[in-house]
Amino acid sequence: MIRRQRLAAGICALLAALAAGIAFPGGAVADETEQQPAPKVELVLDVSGSMRARDIDGGSRMAAAKQAFNEVLDATPEEVQLGIRTLGANYPGIDRKTGCKDTAQLYPVGPLDRTDAKTAVATLAPTGWTPIGPALLKAAGDLQGGDGTRRIVLISDGEDTCQPLDPCEVAREIAAKGIGLTIDTLGLVPDTKTREQLSCIADATGGTYTSVQHKKELSDRVGQLVDRAADPVVTPVATTGADQCAQAPSLKSGLYTDHEEFGQQRWYKVDVAPGKELRASVSVANDRAVNPNYGVLLRAVTTQGREIVRGEAAGNGRTDAVSTGLRYPRPENDDDTATAETVCLQVTHSFSAAAGVKTTPGMPLELTVDVVDSPSPASDVASFGLGRGWWLLGALVLTGFVAGLLWGWLSRWRVAVWRTN
């Protein structure tokens, strides 16, 4: 009887091994993930006297910033080394020279102790000046060392009050050092001067500017930027689109930046071989005051001008960027001599400048191009967790069928043995 039980157990083990071998033909894969350099982020918070203003969801700007920081600290990925620096938090006097030195590191950049960081944030109270330039210089120093991504997230409600040290020039100086540091800015007051200065700081380092006027917007945006630091680094490549496809630059897979003036079109070219799929997306940022109700259009056309596919999106003035994308799968060709097809990408936007707003330089534009193997229709199964293609689905069905037959045979055999005994 024991011998028969062992035989039954062996058959079950064989079935399990068979199922695992078919479903995962590559076998077990060891965790060979290499340790990536730790990304570093420093949150730079304006704690000047103007942060007392109560115009964000009925509460003060300082209260909104504290709430956002607490939520972000709770959600910060473990691999991110995070620090906090303040500006205008300690000197309440009127001496300009002293006030313009008022920047301090509230929490050092390193592994995050959420309780300690929250305790430090809780002590902040709106106090003094707005030395943005000096704070950025110090923050760049705080992030030195290591090979991971480095990001400064600046949150302010007004212009720097410590000129002639222009914070925009400070950002350009940081970018010129080539240390791969990105500065993202968030403005709590949607006035033109604040927008222009914070946009300039962000543009100088390839960062983003966002105007936020609600607590949830602030928390969500800061959280997105901290999460982005943990993403693989992709360095944008500056390019200049043409007025027509014939003179357009030829692009490979990658991330590109450009500027597009009001009423202007930008053209780019991409070669797509048979069996490949072109995936493209574009984002245009309204980095200045614009009229509401605008849109962005991305078209893929042939060199003869025939439209292949398009993507379009609209905005109403509540966001600082509008994005759209498209996909063009080129079918396989039995002719081995078939060459790549040149696809023209056209970017058009319908932004219009508000009264008195400068129209130059053009609106910041970010274009992503990816040419990948064209997926077969069966690959849609992968999106439901069944693996790539129908082969795995068939293997699972076959495994279930064989397992059912063997299990039925095994059950009948055990019943027969039990009756015999």
Image: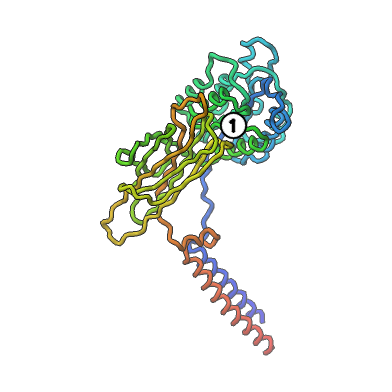
Name which quarter of the figure residue 138 lies in.
Answer: top right
Residue in view at x 41 percent, y 51 percent: 309
Outermost residue toward the front? 355
Question: Circle 1 is placed at which residue position?
Answer: 211
Give the quarter of the image for residue 228: top right
Relative to 417, is 299 above or below? above
Residue at position x 48%, y 35% in the image: 351
Observer-nearest of 215 and 111? 215
In the rendered image, residue 12, in percent from the top left (x then y), is placed at 60, 73
- Image quadrant holding the C terminus, namely bottom right
In this view, 202 is above or below 226? above
Front residue of 15/398: it is: 398
Q: Position of residue 284 (x, y in %)?
A: 48, 37
Left or right of residue 123: residue 416: left
Q: Residue at x 35, y 45 (%)?
A: 344
Tag 1 secondary structure: strand
In this view of the protein, can residue 227 be seen by the observer?
yes
Colour mode of the rendering: rainbow
Residue 9 at x, y percent in the picture: 62, 74
Q: How many discs mark residues in the rendered view?
A: 1
Determine whether, in the image, residue 249 is placed left or right of residue 83: left
Q: The residue under label 1 is which amino acid type?
A: Ser
**Residue 191 x %, y %:** 59, 25
Q: Residue furthest bottom?
A: 420
Q: Is residue 150 visible?
A: no
Instruction: Choose between 266 and 216: the one closer to the eye.
Output: 266
| The N terminus - image quarter | bottom right
Residue farthest left in this picture: 337
